Amino acid sequence: MTIENLLFIYDSDLKKRNWSDWVISHIMFSPPVHRYSGRAKILSDQFIFKGYDKQKNKNVEIILYRHLITQLYLGYDKTYSHFQVLFNSGL
């Protein structure tokens, strides 16, 4: 399975955000806060991300092996509510 237009950020990067980052990420039509953008392939034994790291200004490939993944979460949290995600995605 391939996921297109994937945005993600590590929790350690979220902790480094400042006040202006928070404001920009919560303005209408701005994308959710992220460090990486690209596409991912989910295989039976690994998660392969290929895309762009905007902090380092370069293309990256990140491979996560299944046996190293301890938790996967899909949903809404305190950073982005359901309303913000729907509104920013244009749905």
Image (spheres, grey):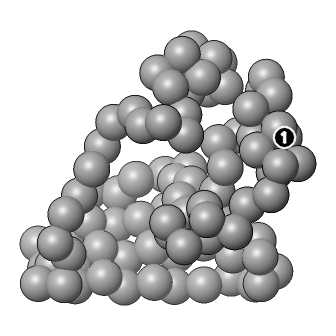
Dividing the picture into quarters, in which one does residue 68 lie?
bottom left
Mark 1 Cα within 10 Å, few/some/many (few <14, many 20+)?
A: some
Q: Quadrant of the C terminus?
A: top right
Residue occupying the point 65% across, 42% down: 32
Residue occupying the point 83% across, 38% down: 23
Against 60, is 10 above or below?
A: above
Q: Which of 81 and 47 lies nearest the eye of the viewer?
A: 81
Dividing the picture into quarters, in which one does residue 74 lie?
top left
Residue occupying the point 74% across, 32% down: 26
Residue occupying the point 33% across, 36% down: 75
Residue type, mark 1 in image: Ile
In this image, 26 relative to 34: left or right?
A: right
In this image, 27 relative to 50: left or right?
A: right
Against 54, is 67 above or below?
A: below
| Residue where numbered disc 1 is placed | 24
Q: Quadrant of the N terminus?
A: bottom left
Across and down, in percent, residue 77 comes to 42, 37
Across and down, in percent, residue 71 comes to 19, 63
